[in-house]
Amino acid sequence: MSELRALLREFDTAMLVTMTPEGLLRGRPMEIQDPAELGDCDLWFVTQEETAKTGEIDREHQVAVCCYRPRDRAYISISARAAVERNQEKIRSLWKPSWKAWLPDGPDHPHAAFLKLSVERAEYWEPEGGRLRVLYEKAKALVQRRAADQKLNPPKHL
């Protein structure tokens, strides 16, 4: 888990993927928070308590988190179980200005909540040769009618 936490410090934004009541997968960008600030979970986000994502998590706790780092085209894929928790005192003590995107009324937002995730599996991809290798393998795969990921690094399980 410490390796995953160290890697996550290099990523700013993640896509949180939940399942809608209709069984569709839905992703939305979320700002990655410092896991050390909330010690009782592996990964967490700040949100409003009454949103589509919190309703989806209440119905289905299984979520995915996908991260991308453009400088070297590295990826993290996380499978986790999520829970919604309201703790106004903790929101006030941890408040960051960037949270205004989710909590426009500031630290005293009446519906502020945390999404707390317990990681079940995490994978990390960092293509050898960087971006050019990835683009080359994708183009070559199209010509040879095979999957590009056959030549790319397999994911590293964290």
Image (tube, helix red, strand yellow):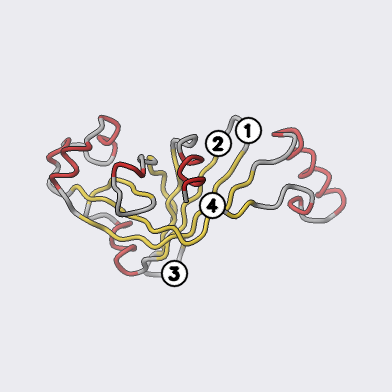
- Tell me which amino acid carries mark 1: Asp
- The nearer-to-camera label among 1 and 3 is 1
Classify residue 80 by image quadrant. bottom left
Q: Are marks 1 and 3 in contact (CB under 8 Å)?
A: no
**Residue identifier under label 2:** 69
How far, Cα to Cα, is label 1 from label 3? 33 Å
Instruction: Residue 3: give x, y in percent of width and height.
Output: 51, 45
Q: Residue lying at the far front in this picture: please name it.
A: 2
**Rendering coords of residue 62 (x, y %):** 41, 65
Residue position for label 4: 77
**Pointers 4 and 1 in contact (C-beta within 8 Å):** no
Q: What residue does disc 1 label?
A: 72
Q: Earlier in the sequence, mark 4 or mark 2?
A: 2
Q: Amino acid at mark 2?
A: Arg
**What is the secondary structure assignment of the residue under circle 2?**
strand
**What is the secondary structure assignment of the residue under circle 4?**
strand
Gap between marks 4 and 1 measured at Cα = 16 Å
- Residue 107: x percent and y percent? 16, 37
Q: Viewed as shown, does residue 24 lie left or right of 107?
A: right
Q: Earlier in the sequence, mark 2 or mark 3?
A: 3
Q: Nearer the viewer, mark 2 or mark 3?
A: 2
Whether pointer 2 and pointer 1 mark residues with C-beta atoms closer than 8 Å, the reply is yes
The amino acid pointed to by label 3 is: Gly
| Tags 2 and 3 touching, CB below 8 Å | no
Q: Give the alpha-carbon distance from disc 4 to disc 3, as whole Å.
A: 20 Å
- Label 4, label 2: how many angstroms apart (C-alpha)? 12 Å
Residues at badges 4 and 2 in contact (C-beta under 8 Å)?
A: no
> Which residue is the site of mark 3?
23
Look at 42% across and 51% down and name the residue there.
Answer: 16
